[in-house]
Amino acid sequence: MMSAAPATEDTPTVDDAPTADAPAPVDDAPVTSADAASAGARVVLNNVGHTFDHRDMLFQHVSLVLLPRHVYALTGPSGSGKSTLLSIIAGWVEPSEGQVRRERCGRVCWVFQNPHGVARRLAVDHVALPFVARGETRSQAERHALELLDDFGLRHRAYAPFNALSGGEAQRLMLARGVASHAGLLLVDEPTAQLDLHAADTVNERLHALSSSGAIVIVATHDPHTRDACTDVIDLRDFQ
């Protein structure tokens, strides 16, 4: 396991960001996770800090480069700002200090800690839907969905309705659907927080499958087993 790469002198700075007079080029086609990996996608954090009361900083001086095919564990004690930093990386929250650049990342997908699905919809249909939305036939989408379910240890539950899945199975299903979305940036918030130890272990054992998508994956967690299942660690205690 490695620490995330810090920003270096070769890393684009805030001054390199596109201005209103020179907008960044936009491709006609959306960037998928595979495109992101091949196109040199990355997320660059330049001296990022955040506060909600303009006095006490949750974190500060966060300078990192995040790359495809890595699964980053974002760790720190409760209240250290893990979910807030995820929101900043996603572009949903403006940091109080510094800047985040998402380069060639394309679609952003968020997997929340409480898995939400359609009660009577089959597990395979939850994963097949993103493929259908991209124009695949039903049979093509189901085949690809079954492959992903196999990666996450759910092939045997493919034709079970969502409301028949255990907590660990439901969370793994949401991770599989996140990969199916072909997002270039996949954010996972506390995937084992609501699970018992056994169910959490079944999720942690499959986290490696997230990196196979070619996306940049960031997992906020307080669980040391989840941390150890990731390829790199960003510890917010280093940025207090």
Image (cartoon, grey):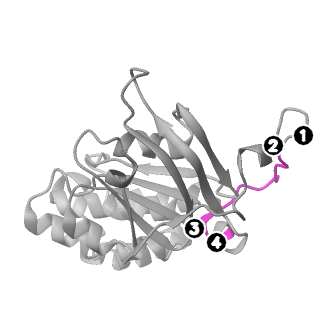
Q: Is residue 39 left or right of residue 112?
A: right
Q: Decide which of tag 4 and tag 3 comes sooner along the chain.
A: 4
Residue sitting at x 17%, y 64%: 200
Q: Amino acid at mark 4?
A: Ala
Residue 226, position in %: x, y?
Answer: 25, 66
In magenta segment, residue 34? yes
For the residues labelled 4 and 2, say whether their Cβ atoms are less than 8 Å apart. Answer: no
* Label 4 crowd bin: few (<14), some (14–19), many (20+), radius 10 Å: many
> Real-space Cα distance between discs 3 and 2?
21 Å
Residue 165 visible within the image? no
The local secondary structure at tag 1 comes to loop
> Real-space Cα distance between discs 4 and 3?
8 Å
Residue sitting at x 23%, y 48%: 77
Pick the front one: 173 or 41: 41
The secondary structure making up most of the magenta span is loop
Residue 174, position in %: x, y?
Answer: 35, 57
Task: Identify the residue position indicated by label 2 in the image.
Answer: 18
Q: Amino acid at mark 1?
A: Ala
Magenta stretch in the rendered image: 24-35
Task: Identify the residue position indicated by label 3 in the image.
Answer: 67
Pick the front one: 152 or 86: 86
Pick the front one: 184 or 234: 234
For the residues labelled 3 and 1, say whether their Cβ atoms are less than 8 Å apart. Answer: no
User: Residue furthest toward the right?
Assistant: 21
Query: Which dot marks residue 22?
Result: 1
> Real-space Cα distance between discs 1 and 2?
6 Å
Q: Decide which of tag 4 and tag 2 comes sooner along the chain.
A: 2
Q: Amino acid at mark 3?
A: Leu
